[in-house]
Image: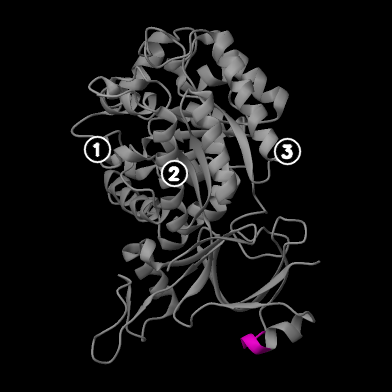
Amino acid sequence: MVEETIYFGRFISAPQPDELLIRTGAVLVNRNDGKGVIKKADWTVTSSSDAASKFGVEAPVVVAKDSGFFFPGFIDTHIHAPQHPNVGIFGKSTLLDWLTTYTFPLESSLGNVNSPMYKDAVSPPDPLARAKAVYNRVISRTLANGTTTASYYATIHVDATNLLADITFARGQRAYIGRVCMDRPEMCPDYYRDESTEQTIANTKASIAHCKSLDASGELVAHIVTPRFAPSCLPQTLTQLGELAKEEGLRIQTHISENLNEVKLVKELFPDQSSYADVYDHHGLLTPKTILAHAVHLSKEEMRLVKAKKSKISHCPNSNSALGSGLCPVRELLDEGIEVGLGTDVSGGYSASILDAVRNACIVSRHVGFLHDGDSRYNVGVAEGLWLATMGGAKVVGMEGRLGGFEEGMLWDVQEIALGEVESDGQGEDLEVDIFGWESWENRVAKWVWNGDDRNVRRVWVGGRLVHETR
């Protein structure tokens, strides 16, 4: 039986950095292959009652409210799933002490009964039970905020990492699952590291096999090779991870040049390489399938190397600001021809919302412009921020042409947005974004970007499957 659904209403997307495309019409989605692909789009359809006859099919019609619109699902190119309980907890820390004080203890607690977080426990804990609660919650949060695709860091633990894959697969979120690799003794706590390169590779292979057992196609869930960052791994481990990713044809994710002290540390640990980017290149980790998070302090030479290797950047403005890491020069990255998307970087970032990352990308860009004598060329506007969150993100995760828009052949990974209609007496729904009726649609979208949150997300689909609905 052919599974088809028609969606009618207003469709808004950002197909180019300087373009906000606003159309009204209908889209026919076919789920016969289980993927939920846009079979046909017709921008001449003017009513929901005419949609079925226009397409010549008998299918249910899903209608967006007149005050709302369909928008491509957000793509979070960098998020740490086990860190969700620590959202908003970073004190006055900078990156390296934040990892030691907050991050490693929490992550270890999801798979190790000897975690420092359990030192005062009266009864033996169940780390996997904690992991299940954390992972279900972070997936609920991201879906509720319109994130249809996420590139997740998990922990070093195979069982907990596989559990994250199980939950994302069951909940229907498109996800890349990374078992975190860290085995350099002098850089990793004894309670939270792999014992050797051999163990790192064996455990990574086990997680790869589990993801394949869930989804052999890798369409919905796939493993992503994840050295935490260069200082956390032995040199031979970095090399073997690069080789493994190449053999398996897998994506890679790691961190680069987030913090000045981190950059200095990398130079001390890898004196034979000319730069942080060169370290990854030397070990075979700069590939067209590589996602480099942050890139706040890349030199021009490093930018050109990243571009030459066709690696991608995840811009995480919330985290960079919260941890005081610096201001990422996004315009310079884009000018170099590097693909850039957005990441929440939970929990260095204080929110699981990519919409919040969009507005912070806009704000940070203005600070960068101020440091360049107020040059507005550096500014990221609403359309470009939304482009980074969708089309840009699709390029970063290797899904260009398949996610981020409403063109025929694209996957139906979509969120339905509702805006608050203010009545004549000033009353209205509590949807945070107040629409008085006289605003242009460009201005309504701008108000959503600057004021919106999960209350505006009515429904979310991944591959045509409804995965979240506001009750």
User: In front: mark 2 or mark 3?
Assistant: 3
Residue 272's x, y, as percent?
49, 7
User: In front: mark 1 or mark 3?
Assistant: 3
Give how far apart the Cα atoms at labels 1 and 3 are. Answer: 37 Å
Up-down: is 246 above or below 460? above
- Give the residue type that dot 3 points to: Ala
At 49% from the left and 10% from the top, the residue drawn is 234
At 32% from the left and 48% from the top, the residue drawn is 364
Residue 198's x, y, as percent?
58, 9
Crowdedness near tag 2: few (<14), some (14–19) or many (≥20) residues, C-alpha within 10 Å: many
At 55% from the left and 15% from the top, the residue drawn is 200
Q: Which badge, 1 or 2, comes first in the chain's sequence? A: 1
Return the residue at label 3.
216
Circle 3: element type: loop
- Whether residue 173 is visible here, answered yes or no, is no
Return the residue at label 1.
89
Return the residue at label 2.
343
At 71% from the left and 26% from the top, the residue drawn is 248
Q: Who is closer to the viewer here, 256 or 166? A: 166
Residue 146's x, y, as percent?
47, 58
User: In the displayed structure, does residue 43 sit left or right of residue 386?
Assistant: right
